[in-house]
Image: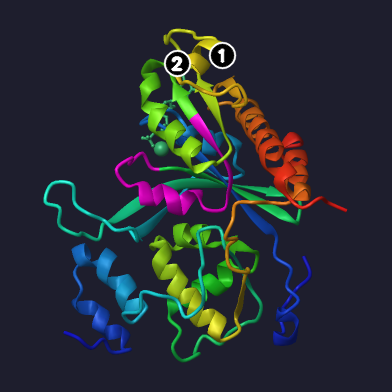
Amino acid sequence: MDSVRSEGEAARVKLPTAIKILIAGGFGAGKTTMVGSVSETRPLRTEELLTDRGSGVDDLSGVEEKKTTTVAMDFGRISIGDAHVLYLFGTPGQERFWFVWDELALGAMGAVVIADTRRLADCFPSVDYFERRGTPFIVAVNCFEGARRYDVEEIRMALDLGPATPVVLCDAREKESSKNVLVTLVEHAMRTRAPAQEPVG
Amino acid sequence: MTHLSDDPAEEQWLDDEAGRIVRPYVMTRGRTEPSRGKIDLITLVVTTKSVSPAEPGLGPEHHTIVRLCERPLSVAEIAAHLDLPAGTIRVLLGDLADRGVVAIQEPARETDALDLETYKAVLNGLRTL
Ligand SMILES: Nc1nc2c(ncn2[C@@H]2O[C@H](COP(=O)(O)OP(=O)(O)OP(=O)(O)O)[C@@H](O)[C@H]2O)c(=O)[nH]1
Ligand SMILES: [Mg+2]
């Protein structure tokens, strides 16, 4: 990249486009493992203090309450040429705090929901959330040793997924496998979103 | 204690426990919002000009950011490297942007839509990883 030292040149700095993909799923499903296996560095961690901007009414007391929570997220980076940089965020598993998800999902290209076949129900909240929000997502079935083997159609039925949502089997520890998961997601996101855009050229 | 002076010596009365919460507050002199618009976790930052170590109003954390961002880094990466909450980084970045020391990528998109070329570029990049 050209050096951009002087103030005059600052205006012409060309930064890459940053893209965000979310890696969701239940506790211990393999989110951090997937971020690590496919990113160019080991997973980093960032903390964000988030405030619920909606009308937060406490369930028990009915008193208006402004909810604030600190969430820690694991993330990794994949540089794609000079023009793009992809960030993978392992979402925190705090379904209580939907506003955390809203903040993270804004501007995301799509999401991977990791399903752990030992605890399939743990990924229901993630699936529900992305369906409702309209974020393109796929389900990646992480195959742990000793767990019962499901086929893709069984998983689709169990999660009540529409026919358009891809389901793939994976091993989150393997780079090739995680890469395949991301390729499947981006293809899916392109199919579902790109046609709705202004015609190109 | 309503007034926080600019004197770094004041940090001394903070104990270890309080450090994680109070120090970012001192660093940003109580400001919790950056002086610029919305900066999200994947907003990219690059250093555009060098800055004197004696520049008034800048602390060691500012200078660390200037050094880290010789190559473009996201707010999330800066926060992870400095081990500070992302909100604190936003405020520090505002100080640097006000001085023209860093360039901050345009505010985040309001929608999730990306153009077809972006999808294609990402796909090609992933396939050749
Ligand atoms: N056999 C097998 N083990 C895996 C796989 N993916 C992850 N693991 C292991 O499962 C454990 C949990 O993985 P993590 O990546 O930490 O899961 P996580 O979803 O980030 O967990 P939390 O952040 O705590 O919710 C680790 O010990 C991993 O080594 C996989 O594909 N196969
Ligand atoms: Mg994790």
Say the numbered circle drawn on residue A142: none
Q: Circle 2 sits in a helix, a strand or a loop, which is it?
A: helix
Q: Which residue is mark 1?
A: A152
Where is residue A146 drawn, in percent x and y? Answer: 42, 9
Where is residue A103 drawn, in percent x and y? Answer: 45, 54
Labels 2 and 1 in the same subunit: yes
Does residue B78 appear to the left or right of A7 in the view shown? Answer: left
Q: Looking at numbered disc 1 in the image, what kind of residue is underneath it?
A: Val
Q: Which residue is mark 2?
A: A158
Q: The residue marked by circle 2 belongs to what chain?
A: A
Q: Circle 1 sits in a helix, a strand or a loop, which is it?
A: helix
The vertical placement of B22 against A71, above or below, is below
> Label 2 to label 1, Cα distance in Å?
10 Å
> Looking at the image, which is closer to me, A142 or B54?
A142
Q: The residue marked by circle 1 belongs to what chain?
A: A
Does residue B85 appear to the left or right of B99 in the view shown? Answer: left
Q: Looking at numbered disc 2 in the image, what kind of residue is underneath it?
A: Ala
Query: Residue at the location (31% across, 78% down)?
Result: B26
Q: Is residue A127 magenta?
A: no
Mark before the other along the chain sequence, 2 or 1:
1
Task: Estimate how packed mark 2 is, as few (under 14), some (14 to 19) or many (20 or more) residues with alpha carbons within 10 Å.
Answer: few
| Span shown in magenta | A92-113
> Looking at the image, which is closer to me, A54 or A174?
A54
